[in-house]
Image (cartoon, grey):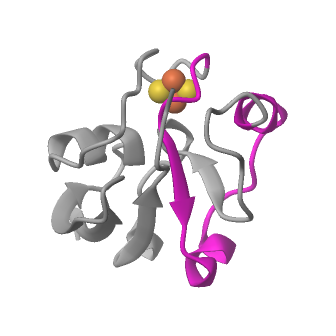
Amino acid sequence: MTTITLNLIDYDGTARTFSARIGRSLMKASLDGGVDGVAADCGGCLTCATCHVVVAPEWLAKLPPRSADEEAMLDMAAHPREPGSRLSCQIQLTPELDGLVARVAPTQY
Ligand code: FES
């Protein structure tokens, strides 16, 4: 398996299902997939918090834990953090994430 399927909901509620390469970050895969609302201003350097997504509860256990730096950046995100909040640039796609469901935070600024 070299690709997996992602199910993302844009900031405006539009549902998108698309394929993404394993090893790519969720942020870059979202941009590749035309998902609206992921700004990713820093390009994945973990300095902007504009790649905020909220992962569906049933997928949270399959993700690596947040680093201390991700935790700190989430505290500065424009949309208040939720239990499933993650910075999508910090999630590397793995086979275990095939079918992942997440929604883009309603605002990144
Ligand atoms: Fe800037 Fe994720 S793209 S923190």
Q: Residue 83: x percent and y percent?
A: 74, 64
- Image position of 85 with respect to 90: above or below: below
Residue 63 magenta: yes
Q: Residue 104: x percent and y percent?
A: 42, 53
Q: Residue at x 75, y 55 (%)?
A: 65
Number of marks in picture: 0
- Image position of 89 with respect to 1: above or below: above
Q: Residue at x 62, y 33 (%)?
A: 78
Q: Residue at x 38, y 40 (%)?
A: 27
Q: Residue 44: x percent and y percent?
A: 47, 24
In the rendered structure, the answer to whether residue 69 lies left or right of residue 54 reads right
In front: 108, or 20?
108
Tell me the magenta residue range.
47-74
Q: Quadrant of the rendered structure where residue 84 is?
A: bottom right
In the rendered structure, the answer to whether residue 43 lies left or right of residue 52 reads left
In front: 14, or 54?
14
Q: Residue at x 62, y 63 (%)?
A: 63
Q: Quadrant of the N terminus?
A: bottom left
Residue 104 magenta: no
In the rendered structure, the answer to whether residue 99 lies left or right of residue 78 reads left
Q: Quadrant of the rendered structure where residue 20 is?
A: bottom left
Q: Residue 95: x percent and y percent?
A: 39, 70
- Image position of 43 with respect to 26: above or below: above
